[in-house]
Amino acid sequence: MIATHTAAPAHPVTQTGGWVPCPDPAPHPALGGRRVSHIGGGLWLGLRAMLLGLDPAAAEHDSTAGACDLLRLLALTARPANGGGYLTDPVADLGHRPVRLRPDGAGALLADQP
C-alpha cells in the first residue's frame, strides 16, 4: 500500500520523498482514460521547477494547476511500457529522465521517474 499525505500548499512531503495525491482528478485520454492518482515527490518538485522556468507568472499564480498541466502535456507523449503503464522519452527539464506512469492497482496510474 502506498503511504499518502495531504498536500499542503508548500508540499512538505516532497522534501522527503513519498507520494503526493494528484490534484487533477480528470482522466487522461492519452492514458486510456485513466487518471493519475499520485505523483512521486521528486517528480512533483521537478514539475513545479519546470513550470517556474517556462512560465514564472503561471507558477506565481497557481503552481499546482500549472504542474498538473505540465504532467498532462507529458502524458500526451507517453507510449505503452513493458509491464503495463506508460513511459515518456527523457525530459531535459526533469534531469533527462523519463516520466513513468504505472498502474496503481486500483485502476488509476502512479506518476514518477525511474
Image: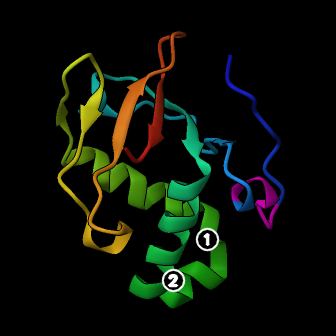
Residue 93 in which image quadrant:
bottom left
Magenta residue span? 9-14
Name the residue tied to disc 2.
52
Q: Nearer the viewer, residue 1 or 80?
A: 1
**Quadrant of the image for the N terminus?**
top right
Residue that carries the numbered disc 1 in the rendered image: 63
How many numbered marks have been drawn onto this rendered protein structure?
Answer: 2
Check the image and report above or below for 65 versus 58. above
Q: Is residue 10 magenta?
A: yes
**Image position, residue 22 (x, y; %):** 61, 41
**Does label 2 or label 1 sit earlier along the sequence?**
2
Q: Percent x, y for residue 76?
A: 23, 46
Callout 1 secondary element: helix
Q: Nearer the viewer, residue 16 or 39?
A: 16
Residue drawn at point x = 54 percent, y = 10 percent: 106
Residue at image coords 75%, 29%: 3
Locate residue 33: give its quadrant. top left
User: Is 88 left, or right, of 2 in this rendering?
Assistant: left
Q: Residue at x 40, y 61 (%)?
A: 70
Give how far across and how far down residue 66 sits, in percent: 52, 66
Of 91 and 29, which appears nearest the observer? 91
In what quadrant of the picture does the C terminus appear? top left
Q: Which residue is the extreme one toward the top?
A: 106
Residue 108 or residue 17, whichever sits in front: 17
**Three-letter code for the amino acid on which mark 2 is drawn:** Leu
What is the quadrant of residue 39 in the picture?
top right
Q: Residues within 10 Å of mark 2 (few under 14, many from 20)?
A: some
| Magenta stretch encompasses residue 94 | no
* Badge 2 vs badge 1, beta-carbon distance below 8 Å: yes
Question: What SS does tag 2 mark?
Answer: helix
